[in-house]
Image (tube, coloured by chain):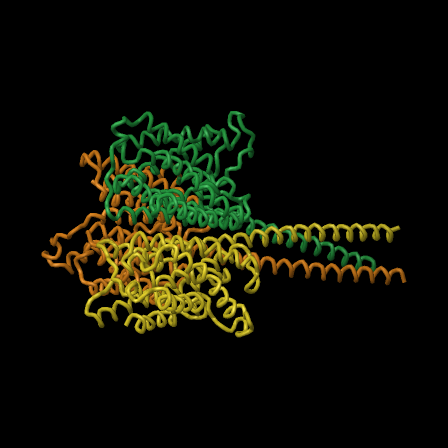
Chain colours: A orange, B yellow, C green
């Protein structure tokens, strides 16, 4: 009798243990679900935020910077707007077909499309003010697939030429800036006649301040550009490295500009300051702080000279 | 003896089980509390971030866009600043009385107040440069209560005319843009004399670039406008839809502008590009990507023509 | 036999209980780790976001505002860029030595460095357009250590003059704005000759619109400045208080400007509007909403008159 009573307690206890375990487990899974499911959107929204920052750079930053360099106002801004409007949907379209490697999800794809648009703007910067609007759009349609091929080969081990992860290029200095610049040189050689290339381009009085506006917007949002796809925990360190590199590069540019020309050229500030940003871009998540300032300070010497 | 010893082990076991369960439960509740309590502020701060983006649109975006459309510089900017400074506190004041439906909490209320200010700027855009400063402020005091009545009727089932949720208007295209535009037409008919309305308005050389700056700022931050009050998980999709619609709308505007006028008018770009943003606004969280581009591409045909 | 069988069940049960508990505990710790470890970076990234907003204020906001006040274009913008590029790395360098109190981690240190740069820009605003570029940099090198000494004494109980927490200065109105302004007066007295100080400074036609751009950028991002280091839960309330104070201050400035001068001066709007931001700054996390509007409305009376 006692036996069986004990047995009952035993069974009840075992049952209550199983029920309690199940309740704890269920609550646990529910919490884990809510915690992680809510965690991800929050991180996604922070990426979206950096995507907006990059859009400021593309439209307002590049637009007004180019308005200066070539002395063009309206047409540089319109060209910028059209190039971005062709480049981003085209990249998303091609990426969604899975032609070059795997397709990315949602906000990552938007950011990669913005990177492609940035590279496109760098490539066309070389001929800005020298082509007609339909030519810009033709360039965009031509450029994006080649950019994506290059990106696939360098970063996703496309065609098996490089191992995945073999190339450190967090801020996209190699894929975005170098490819854009080289493609731009190709365009100058093929799409412009000598007369078109040598055509002098008029400037006006306020264009320098507009271009300073463009430079400053690029300066300010550069950390978001470099940190756009970095894991959430690395963002602050990347941001600080990029800001220190930009400070160092700005100062170095000033001293070199004064030393070489005996006076300060606003164009040097605009161009070479940003060279610091490009230079830190490739390794912005490896560099320690002192290295960041040193990278920033040394690179413009070569580029601004 | 063995019995009772076993019983002791049994009791000890049961006690340890209860203690362990309590410890797990307590830790669990503590974690759930910390996790969820910290989750909400983070989401609130992300809303605040979008609220700041909307402020950029209201002050810098609308301000500089209007500086162009009417050719006014200083006075358009000052009017923008005054209208926003009257509209936002007035909305928050009336909302906190609970006169039109329920009051919103904190950051949601701020965003709704910014929406009202956007509608007010659209309404006054029709008469910008034609009124005196005190008249603008009078308009703001008159406009906000009517806007809130309209918002209450359409979205909160005020007066029982529409069912709650019957009208899809995530990006506020109906409540904000249509009401603002219609109110503006009413103001032209009542507050301006024929002479005032026909008065031609001077422009100057750099105003087109300032207005491009305004257009670009509106373009860039439009996703934050549409996604301001959307649940955190939907934000990335809304943002991508809005950006694709804006790209499509920009391209369509360019082609229509060239086709209809044989040359590109900067005013068309500014006006019709943003029409794509308004068109996607109402349904930005339903549309799939291809639909977004198509909406963006078709709407400006009607509006820019 | 039955006994030992029961004993086996018992042991098995106990073992399974221990294993289950261990699994739950492990999962629990893992979740807690992932949840809290991911929580902190998310909050850090939100701080980084506000740090970017402050950079917009420093470079574009202050730069273009100063371009107006002194009528200087290029050189005011270049000076702003150089001052920020010297100030931020210098602050981070000195802070990392631990000379003045404890060193801050990562993103907090960046924000404090930006605060120091803001104070430096206020101090040099008084002599902008009157000094040569190397003099600005000399000023920056001189200013930062004194600023840090002042910050240490007022906020970190340095030298034991004030108790920690005795001074309410969330938005940095006392440390940043008052110290910057007083230092600036000192510079006028010592670094400029009477001739330099009385030198009239040329303006041009578009500078007023550039300065309105600067004012609006400062207006828009002021909430991020005040909320930069506030705990995550207080950010929305601080933002709303600051926005209401800025609205009140803008309206009050308009009425005082019309009342005192019979016409609206753009310089008054720029200067006194922001006085509301400074006034709310010190107590932006204590004030309730009506108090915020009242603070905003009253302070400019004194400063703009």
**Residue furthest left in the image:** A195
What is the count of numbered marks? 0
Q: Nearer the viewer, residue A150 or C164?
A: C164
Q: Classify A59 as above or below C126.
A: below
Note whether residue B6 is visible: yes
Note whether residue A105 is visible: no
Q: Nearer the viewer, residue C251 or A304?
A: C251
Residue name at image x 83 percent, y 58 percent: C3
x and y percentages locating residue C280 in the rendered image: 48, 43
x and y percentages locating residue A246 in the rendered image: 33, 42
**Residue furthest right in the image:** A1
x and y percentages locating residue B49 in the rendered image: 45, 53
Question: Which quadrant: the C terminus of chain C?
Answer: top left
Which image quarter: residue A1?
A: bottom right
Question: Which quadrant: the N terminus of chain C?
Answer: bottom right
Q: Nearer the viewer, residue A69 or A253?
A: A69
x and y percentages locating residue B154 in the rendered image: 50, 70
Left-right relation of A197 to B293: left
Q: Classify C238 as above or below A108.
A: above
């Amino acid at each position: 009798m006692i036996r069986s009573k004990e047995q009952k307690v035993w069974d009840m206890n075992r049952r209550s243990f199983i029920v309690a375990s199940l309740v704890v487990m269920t609550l646990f899974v529910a919490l884990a679900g809510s915690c992680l499911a809510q965690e991800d959107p929050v991180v996604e929204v922070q990426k979206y935020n950096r995507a907006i920052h990059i859009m400021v750079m593309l439209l307002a930053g590049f637009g007004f910077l180019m308005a200066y360099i070539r002395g063009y106002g309206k047409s540089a801004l319109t060209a910028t707007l059209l190039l971005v409007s062709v480049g981003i949907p085209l990249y998303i379209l091609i990426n969604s077909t899975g032609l070059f490697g795997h397709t990315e999800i949602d906000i990552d794809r938007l950011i990669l499309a913005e990177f492609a648009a940035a590279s496109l703007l760098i490539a066309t910067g070389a001929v800005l003010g020298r082509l007609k609007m339909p030519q810009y759009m033709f360039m965009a349609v031509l450029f994006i697939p080649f950019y994506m091929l290059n990106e696939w080969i360098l970063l996703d081990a496309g065609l098996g030429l490089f191992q995945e992860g073999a190339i450190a290029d967090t801020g996209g200095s190699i894929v975005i800036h170098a490819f854009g610049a080289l493609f731009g040189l190709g365009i100058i050689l093929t799409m412009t006649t000598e007369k078109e290339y040598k055509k002098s381009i008029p400037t006006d009085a306020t264009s320098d301040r507009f271009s300073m506006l463009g430079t400053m917007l690029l300066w300010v949002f550069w950390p978001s550009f470099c940190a756009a796809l970095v894991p959430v925990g690395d963002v602050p360190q990347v941001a600080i490295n990029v800001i220190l590199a930009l400070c160092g590069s700005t100062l170095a540019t000033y001293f070199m500009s004064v030393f070489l020309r005996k006076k300060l050229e606003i164009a040097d500030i605009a161009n070479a300051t940003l060279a610091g940003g490009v230079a830190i871009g490739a390794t912005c998540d490896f560099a320690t702080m002192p290295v960041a300032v040193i990278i920033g300070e040394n690179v413009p010497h070569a580029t601004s000279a």
